[in-house]
Image: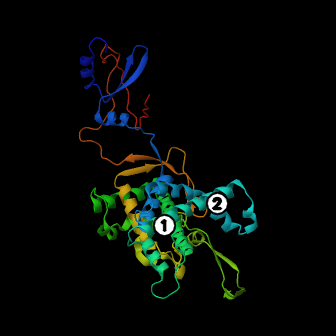
Amino acid sequence: MFRRPLQFLNSLLSQGDLIEIRLGPRRAWMGCHPELVHRMLRDTRQEVDVSAATLGLTTRLISRLLLSDSLTPAAADEVRNCLAAIMRGLFVRMIVPVDALFRLPTPADRRYRRAVERVRELIDAAIAERRRGTPRDDPLGLLLLAAEAGDGGAPVTDREVHDQLVSLLLTGSESPSMCLASTFSLLAQHPEVERRLHAEVDTVLAGRLPGVDDLPRLVYTRSVLTETLRHSPPGWFFTRVTTRETELAGRRLPRGTTVLYSPYLLHHDPASFPEPERFLSERWLEGEAAVGPHGALIPFAAGIRMCIGDLFSMAEMTVALATVAGRWRLRHPAGRVAAPRPGATLGPRALTMICASRTDTPDGTAPHAAALTPGAAPTASGVEKTRRDGDNGVHHT
């Protein structure tokens, strides 16, 4: 290596793909195959915060949908950062609906109130900018038209405009982000489902980005998302209050009674969904019959209170999942699988995964073990034979 470096390097090509050499007293490894070199140059530890990435995606999308460009990218990022504190605070208030407890200036309550106030300021600033600028055909524009009440009806108040936007922004970002994060986690735990998803995406899209016309053809992709909504529904626990005296299952409930229901409970009832703990995307390929008796699948609620964004949310998540699955494979770091955490929504809130490209192995002969016999190594460095394992951990220094 010292006296004849180029000749020495040329001599390695016939010895194998990964060669152990001695540099004085130190041992080192020489990669002689392009695939190995590419693997050495990539950082196999570039772990991705999937929870943050999906929330950033859905926040940007719902912001553009509701407000066009009235919310700047920086403001959208700030809204995303406020959501975690708001959702934690909402969960506590939902489980313990005692107003007096939340008048105490605890650190958690202060974080919640600061986050709520900051989101209010950002939304109010977007509303004010829109009123000064050109009208736009988006939900904010429709709400502002309703506030003018040109048809003689009661005008929508500024507070109602604000509250509608905040409600849509929160639900339109948090819930789909939790569903996508749960989907990536579940796919990593179910490789056969992942393989079938990749096969459909590769067949339908052939390497391009999905478009509107592709949505009806991504049948299995949608089934994966539907099974995630059954298995780990972001909206897992809800409360309602009776507005008048009513009867439920033979029991009289007075006006103002709190009633509860849980999509998670219904989705995990074996009477409706056999083997409820298993992640079985195939059950949704049967069509409407798979929703279970009595319409047990209710990830978007039902009736007049059904989520207004159910169709948009499914389309958004289908496009996002197909886009990522067409290019990347996500894996859990060894020994770490983030369990879904119940809060105002259900899902993995700190999901870190390893993102690996799905790019095929380069053309040519695949890397193989060095096949040197003792004494066959070039004498300049003392090359020794070795075997190439399945996943070399090459770290940069």
Label total for image: 2
The vertical placement of 283 against 348, above or below, is below
Location of residue 188 in the rendering, given as x and y in whole percent from the top left corner: 46, 53
Q: Mark 2 points at which residue?
A: 113
**Callout 2 crowding tier (Cα within 10 Å): few <14, some 14–19, many ≥20:** some
| Near-viewer residue (307 or 21) | 307
Label 1 to label 2: alpha-carbon separation = 22 Å
SS for tag 2?
helix
The vertical placement of 147 against 189, above or below, is below
SS for tag 1?
helix
| Near-viewer residue (1 or 69) | 69
**Callout 1 crowding tier (Cα within 10 Å): few <14, some 14–19, many ≥20:** few
| Near-viewer residue (13 or 314) | 314
Residue located at (43% from left, 71% from top): 284
Q: Mark 1 points at which residue?
A: 128
Classify residue 321 by image quadrant.
bottom left
Location of residue 208 in the rendering, given as x and y in whole percent from the top left corner: 28, 57
- Can the viewer see residue 67 in this picture? yes
